[in-house]
Image (tube, helix red, strand yellow):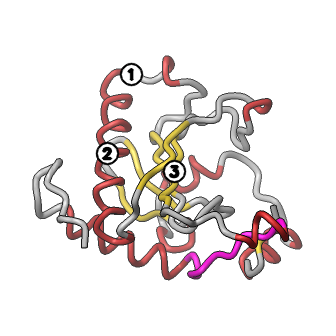
C-alpha cells in the first residue's frame, strides 16, 4: 500500500542504512525524538513505527535483544504486557481510538521487519478508517506528521504516569 504523504520515507530510501538493530539503538537512548521513542519503562519502551500501517501505530519492545517471547525473562514479559495495556489507555486518551490491532510478527514469513528483537505492535483503529482511498487507489492517507504524533503520545504517557494503571480517562 502506498502512502499519499510520507516525507520521512525519502530520507530512509536515499540515506545510509544503519547497521545493527534499530530497536537496540532506540533502547540505548540519546535522542528519543529522533528515534520516535514516546515512553521508557524500567526494562521496556514504546516507540512509533517509522512506517506505520495507521496513524498512531506504535511498538512496545524490551531493551533486551531477544528474538522470541520465550527468550525473555518473566519480568520483561510482564512489563511488555502491562505497557501494551498502558499504551492502549494513553491512545484512548490522546486519539480516542475505537479499537486496536495488537500483535507480533514472528519470522520474516509473518511480516517481521526485525526478526531478532521481539516487539508488539499496537495499531489504533476507528470505525470507517478504511475508506475509498485504500480500497480504490491502494493509498493510505496519514493525517499527521510522525513528530507531531510522537509529541502527543509522549505528553499522553507523561499525563498517564500521574494515575494508577487501569484508570484511563473516559472516552470523549
Q: Quadrant of the N terminus?
A: bottom right
Say if the magenta span includes residue 151.
Answer: no
Is 75 displayed left or right of 108 in the figure? left
Q: Quadrant of the C terminus?
A: bottom left
Specify which label sits upstream in the sequence, 3 or 1. 3
Real-space Cα separation, disc 2 to disc 1, in angstroms: 19 Å
**Classed neighbour count for the residue bearing mark 3: other residues with Cα under 10 Å, few (<14), some (14–19), many (≥20):** many
SS under mark 2: helix
Residue 114: x and y, percent? 69, 41
**Classed neighbour count for the residue bearing mark 1: other residues with Cα under 10 Å, few (<14), some (14–19), many (≥20):** few
* Outermost residue toward the top in this view: 70
Q: State the image quarter where residue 94 is shown.
A: bottom left
Tell me, for residue 59, which label it has, or none.
3
Q: Answer whether labels 3 and 2 touch (C-beta < 8 Å).
A: no
Q: What segment carries the magenta color?
A: 138-146
Specify which label sits upstream in the sequence, 2 or 1. 1
Q: On the image, numbered disc 1 is attached to which residue?
A: 73
Say if the magenta span includes residue 140.
Answer: yes
In the displayed structure, would residue 66 be above or below residue 18? Answer: above
Is 129 displayed left or right of 85 in the figure? right
Mark nearest the camera among 3 and 2 is 2
Mark nearest the camera among 2 and 1 is 2
**Which residue is rendered at x = 41% and y = 51% of the image?**
45
Real-space Cα separation, disc 3 to disc 2, in angstroms: 12 Å
Quick one: 7 or 43, which is closer to the camera? 7
Principal secondary structure, stretch drawn in magenta: loop
**Which residue is rendered at x = 88% and y = 73% of the image?**
14
**Which residue is rendered at x = 56% and y = 81% of the image?**
144
Specify which label sits upstream in the sequence, 3 or 2. 3
**Classed neighbour count for the residue bearing mark 2: other residues with Cα under 10 Å, few (<14), some (14–19), many (≥20):** some
Q: On the image, numbered disc 2 is attached to which residue?
A: 85
Amino acid at each position: 500500500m502506498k502512502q499519499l504523504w510520507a516525507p520521512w520515507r525519502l530520507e530512509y530510501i536515499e540515506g545510509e542504512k544503519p547497521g545493527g538493530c534499530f530497536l537496540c539503538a532506540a533502547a540505548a537512548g540519546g535522542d528519543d525524538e529522533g528515534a520516535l521513542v514516546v515512553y521508557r519503562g524500567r526494562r521496556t519502551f514504546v516507540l512509533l513505527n517509522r512506517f506505520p500501517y495507521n496513524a498512531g501505530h506504535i511498538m512496545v519492545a524490551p531493551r533486551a535483544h531477544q528474538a522470541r517471547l520465550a527468550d525473555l525473562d518473566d519480568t520483561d514479559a510482564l512489563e511488555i504486557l502491562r505497557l501494551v495495556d498502558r499504551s492502549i489507555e494513553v491512545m484512548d486518551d490522546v486519539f480516542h481510538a475505537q479499537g486496536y490491532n495488537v500483535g507480533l510478527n514472528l519470522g520474516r514469513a509473518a511480516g517481521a521487519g526485525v526478526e531478532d528483537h521481539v516487539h508488539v505492535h499496537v495499531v489504533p483503529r476507528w470505525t470507517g478508517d478504511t475508506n475509498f482511498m485504500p480500497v480504490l487507489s491502494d493509498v493510505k492517507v496519514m493525517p499527521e506528521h510522525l513528530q507531531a504524533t510522537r509529541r502527543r503520545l509522549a505528553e499522553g504517557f507523561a499525563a498517564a504516569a500521574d494515575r494508577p494503571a487501569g484508570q484511563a480517562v473516559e472516552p470523549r
